[in-house]
Image (cartoon, rainbow, N blue to C red):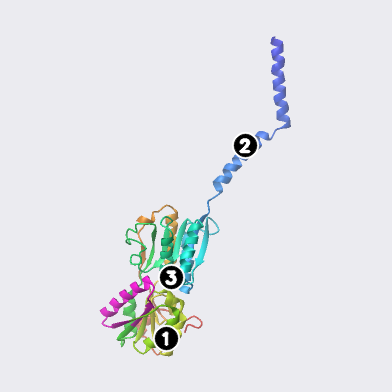
Amino acid sequence: MKRKGMFVTFGLIFAVLIIGFFFPNEQSNNQQTISGESEDSSISEETLTVGLLQTTSHPSLDEIREGTIQGLEENGYGEAENIEINFQNAQGDQNLMNTMANSLVNEGADILIGIGTPASQALKNASSEIPVIMAAVSDPVGSGLVESEENPGANVTGVKNQAPVEDQIRLMTDILPDVETVGLLYSSGEDNARAEARRAESAIEQAGLTPETYTVSSTNEIQQMVASMAKEVDVIYLPTDNTIASAFNTVVSEADRYNMPLIPTVDIMIAQGGLATVGISQVQLGVESGRMAAEVLDGKNPAEFPVYIVEGGDQLINVQKAESIGVTISEEILENSKIIEPEAGGE
C-alpha cells in the first residue's frame, strides 16, 4: 500500500510539471490582465461637460468667453484633458436662448456658464439643480439670479461686473469740463442695463450735471436715437448693455457725424470708437468666472459661494478719436492714462 501511494504521489507531481511546461504563461497572463485593468481604471479620467451659453456676438462677450475657458484651464479643467465644452450662442434671440439653455440641460451638462445676464437667466430658468456660473452680470440680485451677493442661496453664483461708474463720470468731466447734459443710451429690455443706468444717473447728478435717458428696444432704433440725442445732449454715456454693444459700430458712426463724444463702460469699446473710460478687462472677468466654475466642479456649493466683484480698472483714452472730434485732453490726464490705439474702422 505504501508503494502504491508513492506511485500516486509521483504521478501527481509529474502531471503538475507537464502542465507547467506546456502552459507556462497562463497564470502570469491572468495576473497581467488583472493588473492592466487596474492600471487602465486608475489613469482613465471622467470627462465633464461644460454648457456655455452666450447672449450674443460682440467683442466684449467674446473676450469674456475666451477668458472663462482660460480660467477653467488655469484651474485644472482643460478641453484637451478632462472637460468637453458645449458652446451655444443665441445671437440676442431670447426664445432661442431659452431653447438652447434647455438643450444644454437635457444633454447632461455638469455645470452651466452664462455669458451675459440674459444667458445666465435662461440657464437658471432651465435648471434648479445643475450649478450655474454667471459671467460678468451687472446686477445679479436685481435680475433675480441670486438672493444676495454674500449668500447666493441656490444653484447660481459667479462674477459681478460692477462698472466703476463714479470714476468714469469723473474722468468724463475732467476731459469735458464744459459738459452740462449727459445722455444715457441703453436697451429697455435688459435688466443689467437698467441697473447700470440708475447708478450712472446718480453719479451724474452728484457731479452737478443733468442726466437724460434714452432707451431703445432693438438695434434698429439706435441710429435714429443717436441722431436725436446729438441735438439735445453734450456727451453720450453708455451703460453695460448687450443690445448697444452688438451694434456699437452704428453708435460710433452716427455719433461721429455730430462730433459727439462717447463714454462707454466697457474697455474694448475705446478701441472701437469710444473717447475714454475707466474700464475693467473683459478677459479678466472671464478668467474669474472660469476660476469659480472650477471651484464648483471641485465641490464648492454655489449656494454658499459669494459672488465675486471685480472692481477698479484702467483709465483708457483714444487720443485719435479726441483729435478727430475736436476734444483737447490735458497732458496731466494723458500721463495717467493708457493710450488706446483704434481698431481698423474704429477711429
Residue 185 part of the magenta segment: yes
Cα separation, mark 2 vs mark 3, equals 55 Å
Between marks 1 and 2 in the image, the one whose residue lies nearer the viewer: 1
Q: Nearer the viewer, residue 59 or 19?
A: 59
Between marks 3 and 1 in the image, the one whose residue lies nearer the viewer: 1
- Report the residue marked by disc 1: 224
> Would you say 297 lies left or right of 25 here?
left
- Report the residue marked by disc 3: 282
Give, as a three-letter code, the residue at label 3. Answer: Gln
Q: Which residues are magenta?
A: 183-212
> Which quarter of the rendered picture does the N terminus lie within?
top right
User: Residue at (73%, 27%) from the top-left corner?
Assistant: 18
SS at mark 3 in the image? helix
Q: Nearer the viewer, residue 98 or 146?
A: 98
Give, as a three-letter code, the residue at label 2. Answer: Gln
Q: First in sequence: mark 1 or mark 2?
A: 2
Q: Quadrant of residue 132?
A: bottom left
